[in-house]
Every structure is written in structure tokens, then in C-alpha cells.
Amino acid sequence: MEGTSNNQPFTRLALYTYQPLDHEYQLSSMDTRTPGLMSFRNIAVEGNNISFGITYPFPGLTSQIDGRSTKLRHVLHLQNDQQQVLSQYFQYPGGREFLAIEYTYTRIQ
């Protein structure tokens, strides 16, 4: 996916799969805004929503790298066969979870 964040271009690659041996969905992603590959574990499936979680030394979204241990929760909302919405929730140490970013993915054929 290509898009903008704070009016700066970025590219994101996200791979989703279902692992039948573990009976769970898996997600790995990376983008050009932050270093590192993020591999998430499936924490819930409710209807058309799949939730993934990870605790990650998040470098931040600005030029100031802070590396705080941040809980990330991604919720993939399956809209239809052609479109998905990914909501990313962050929780910094001692803070409350908040919606940080939403992406809309549209299948290109």
C-alpha cells in the first residue's frame, strides 16, 4: 500500500494468513516510516473483525526516536471481498489505548 502520513509519502507491506495448525490468523507488516518487521499474534475473532496484538519498542512517528515499549492492537474489519479497513490502536506505558491510524485497503485486480 502507498499513502501519506503527515503529508509525507510512505509504503506499507502487510501479509495476512490463516495458520490451520494453530487455528489462528497471523499478520506481519513493515513500512518505510518506522524500522523493523512487526509480527502480530491473533488475539480475537468477532464476526468480520480480526484483532492482532504485539508489544513493540515503537520508534515514534516523528524524527525523534523514543523506543517506548508500546502495545499495538490492530483490528482488521473485513468490509467485503474487495475492501478492508485496518484500525491501529496504540497504548504507551502508563497511558490509555487510543486509535492512532486507520487504513482502507482496496483490492486491485
Image (tube, helix red, strand yellow):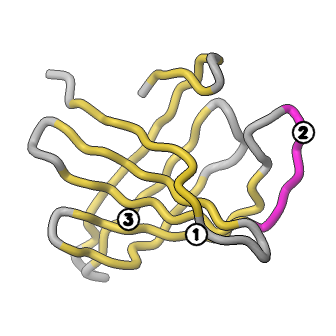
For label 2, the residue is 64
Comparing 97 with 18, the one in front is 97
Quarter of image, res 61? top right
Q: Amino acid at mark 3?
A: Gln
- Mark nearer the viewer, 3 or 2: 2
Q: Which numbered disc flags the more N-terminal residue, 3 or 2? A: 3
Q: Which numbered disc flags the more N-terminal residue, 3 or 1? A: 3
* Badge 1 density bin: few <14, some 14–19, many ≥20, Cα 10 Å: some
Q: Amino acid at mark 2?
A: Gln
Q: From the viewer's perspective, is 66 left or right of 70?
A: right
Q: Secondary structure at mark 2?
A: loop
Name the spot of residue 83 as percent of width and height, x first: 19, 38
Name the spot of residue 99 as percent of width and height, x first: 53, 55
Q: Which mark is residue 54?
A: 1
* Badge 2 density bin: few <14, some 14–19, many ≥20, Cα 10 Å: few
Q: Is residue 93 magenta?
A: no
* Badge 3 density bin: few <14, some 14–19, many ≥20, Cα 10 Å: some
Distance from Cα at disc 3 to Cα at disc 2: 30 Å
Q: Secondary structure at mark 1?
A: strand
Q: Secondary structure at mark 3?
A: strand
- Mark nearer the viewer, 3 or 1: 1
Comparing 16 with 59, the one in front is 59
Q: Which mark is residue 26?
A: 3
Q: Which numbered disc flags the more N-terminal residue, 1 or 2? A: 1
Cβ–Cβ under 8 Å for marks 1 and 2: no
Name the spot of residue 58 as percent of width and height, x first: 74, 55
As drawn, 32 above or below 46: above
Q: From the viewer's perspective, is 42 left or right of 4?
A: left
Which residue does the image show at 58% across and 36% down from the upper left?
31
The segment highlighted magenta reads 63-69
Which residue does the image show at 51% across and 48% down from the upper left?
29
Q: From the viewer's perspective, is 64 left or right of 6?
A: right
